[in-house]
Image (cartoon, grey):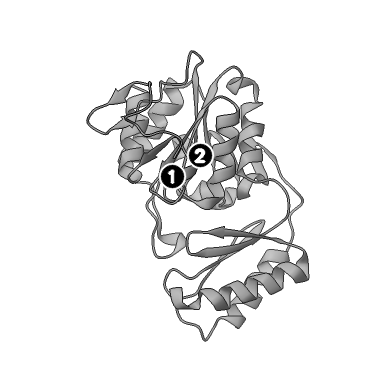
């Protein structure tokens, strides 16, 4: 980890032991957030997650206090996020599908849609129909094969996704108990750079909060732009400036830094 909360010179909240990220030097702050494991607890299946009321209120307050410099950066599709985010947050800047989809003020930039992943979801369902615990998650520009309920099947999932990646020239994104097949192209680091180039984010310093391997490029982009990277849990802590324990700590920090 780049530095511990005790070593940073930024303002510390003694009740949480984390940096209060009004810490973004002398520039105003922008807050960029992963979704799963950051705003909502990881659940056994991807469709069982939810943003609780307290987090929804903290996010709505942050959007107001930061004059709209709030963004969600997620591997989920835009359609999935619209179904999961509170109405007041769904209208903020959203980079979905690892940056393949970018929505700003209702305008979406994205590749042409394809039936590839719907077809692959059907193939995956057939392939794993006799393998209990494998969950297939179809996305607009990707396909997640989750093995959280069957960790002993990791090798089988790895073999199948590698074969599909070679067959269709796709990228494989490793996540927390999931292998995701996705179109080659932007990652979350590219998404952070695109967001920070928007006029409303101009002159600000990014704080990115995330928990998974897919968030590391976003950490690096935020740091390169003079901002901070905050890891939720230990999985990505070695790449971050600060580590938070869990989603509850994220909620506390969001409330604190936008108070």
The quadrant of the rendering that contains the N terminus is top left
Disc 2 versus disc 1: distance between alpha carbons? 28 Å
- For the point 39% across and 65% down, the residue is 44
Q: Quick check: 155 above or below 84?
A: below
- For the point 64% across and 70% down, the residue is 161
| The one of 32 and 223 positioned closer to us in this rendering | 223
Which quarter of the picture shows residue 171? bottom right
User: Regarding mark 2 in the picture, which secondary structure is present there?
Assistant: helix
Q: Residues within 10 Å of mark 2 (few under 14, many from 20)?
A: some
- Residue 252, percent across and down? 30, 34
Res. 237 mark:
1
- Residue 144, percent across and down? 57, 64
- Residue 78, percent across and down? 59, 48
Q: Comparing marks 2 and 1, which lies closer to the viewer? A: 1
Residue wearing tag 2? 90
Q: Quick check: 177 above or below 88?
A: below
Pointer 2 or 1: first along the chain: 2
Q: Is any part of residue 2 visible from this angle?
A: yes
Q: Are marks 2 and 1 in contact (CB under 8 Å)?
A: no
User: Regarding mark 1 in the picture, which secondary structure is present there?
Assistant: helix
């Amino acid at each position: 980890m780049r530095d511990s909360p005790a070593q940073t010179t930024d303002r510390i909240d003694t009740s949480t032991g984390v940096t209060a990220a009004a810490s973004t030097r002398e520039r105003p702050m922008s807050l960029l957030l992963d979704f799963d494991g950051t705003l909502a607890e990881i659940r056994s299946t991807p469709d069982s997650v939810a943003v609780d009321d307290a987090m929804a209120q903290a996010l709505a307050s942050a959007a107001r206090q930061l004059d709209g410099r709030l963004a969600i950066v997620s591997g989920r599709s835009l359609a999935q996020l619209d179904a999961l985010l509170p109405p007041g947050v769904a209208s903020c800047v959203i980079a979905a599908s690892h940056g393949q989809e970018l929505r700003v003020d209702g305008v979406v930039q994205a590749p042409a849609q394809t039936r590839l992943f719907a077809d692959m979801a059907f193939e995956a369902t057939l392939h794993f129909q006799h393998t209990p615990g494998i969950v297939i998650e179809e996305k607009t520009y990707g396909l997640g094969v989750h093995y959280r309920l069957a960790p002993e099947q990791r090798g089988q999932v790895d073999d199948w996704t590698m074969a599909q990646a070679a067959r269709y020239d796709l990228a494989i994104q490793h996540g927390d108990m999931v292998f995701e097949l996705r179109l080659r192209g932007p990652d979350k680091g590219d998404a952070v750079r695109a967001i920070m180039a928007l006029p409303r984010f101009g002159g600000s310093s990014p704080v990115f909060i995330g928990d998974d391997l897919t968030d590391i490029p976003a950490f690096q982009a935020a740091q390169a732009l003079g901002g901070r990277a905050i890891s939720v849990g230990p999985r990505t802590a070695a790449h971050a400036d600060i580590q938070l324990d869990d989603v509850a700590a994220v909620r506390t920090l969001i409330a604190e830094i936008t108070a």
